Image: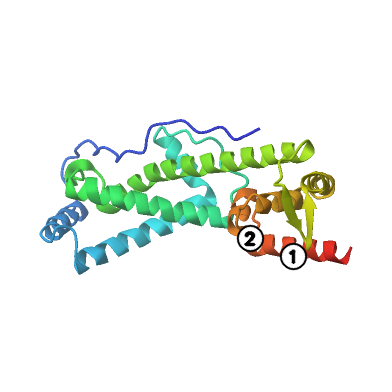
Amino acid sequence: MLPRRPIGPSAEQPSPQPPTNAPSQQHADDLALVEYLEQSGFQGPEFDFFADQLIDHGLHVLHAWTISRKIFTKCAHKGIKLGDPPSDWTEDDRCDLVQDTIFRAFKRFKEKALQARQWIPDGGASLKTYFIGSCIYAFADEYRAWLDRQNARRLELRNLAQQLGSSAPTPTHQRVGAAVLDRTVARKALQALHARDPRLAMIIALETDGYSHKEIAELLADGTTPRAVEGALYRHRCRIEKG
C-alpha cells in the first residue's frame, strides 16, 4: 500500500505569540539587532553573518530532530499531521530534506519575520526560537513534497513491473549487451529476467526508456547509487556477451 499523503495546515509563518508582561533582555537585544539590520535593507556582509549564524543553528537543530524523528512530534504539536515517520528514507533523503527545509524557512523568515516585521519582541519568542518555529512549518511542506515524489516513483515502478509481467512496451529495436534484438525477443528476454531478478529488469527497462543512471537510482529509491546502476548494467552486458 502506498503511504498516505499527510494532511494538515499549510506551512505558513507562525503568528506572533500573545504578549507577555515585558520583553526579556534577549528580546530587547534581538529587537535592536533587527532595527540595526533593517538600516541596510537586510542585506550586506553584516546581514550575511547574521544569516549564516541563524542557518547554522537551524541545521544543527533540524539534523538532530530528523535523526531522532522528533520533528514529527514537533509538527504534531502544531496541528500538522504527517503520519508515522518513514521507514525507507535514506541518509541522503534526510539531509536533502533538512537543506531544503532550511532554505524555505529562512526565505520565509526574512520576508515575513524581518522585512514585514511579523516578529515582535513582545511575542514571547526570541529570533532563534521564532526561526525554528518557521523550520517546523517548512519541514511539513518539504516532507509532503518528498512523500509525493516517493509515491510517484512507487507507482511508476509498480506499473513497470506489471508491464514486464505481461506485455512490456519496448522499442522496435533494443540494445541488450552487444546484440540488437527485435521487439518480441526483447520483451521475452525482459520478462524472463524479471522472473529471476526484478530489480535488474527494471534498471534495463528504465535505461531503454531513456532514463539516466541518476534518474534510475532516484526511481528505485532503495539506496542504489548511479554508480551501482552503471555497475549492474555493465555486469549484465558482460554476461550477455559471454553467452
Q: Looking at the picture, how far across and down is residue 20, in whole percent?
A: 19, 39
Query: Dot 2 lies on which element?
Result: loop
Q: In the image, what residue occupies the spot 49% across and 46% down?
A: 70
Q: In the image, what residue occupies the spot 73% across and 53% down?
A: 174
Q: Looking at the picture, how far across and down is residue 205, in whole percent?
A: 70, 49
Point out which mark residue 234 bears. Answer: 1
Report the colour scheme: rainbow
> Which of the two labelled residues, at mark 1 and mark 2, occupies the earlier sequence position?
2
Q: Mark 1: which amino acid?
A: Tyr
Q: Quadrant of the C terminus?
A: bottom right
Q: In the image, what residue occupies the spot 19% across and 61% down?
A: 43
Point out which mark residue 162 bears. Answer: none
Instruction: Give residue 76's quadrant in the image.
Output: top left
Query: Dot 1 lies on which element?
Result: helix
Q: Nearer the viewer, residue 28 or 150?
A: 150
Q: Looking at the picture, how far across and down is residue 6, in whole percent?
A: 50, 33
For disc 2, the marked residue is: 225
Q: Nearer the viewer, residue 130 or 228?
A: 228
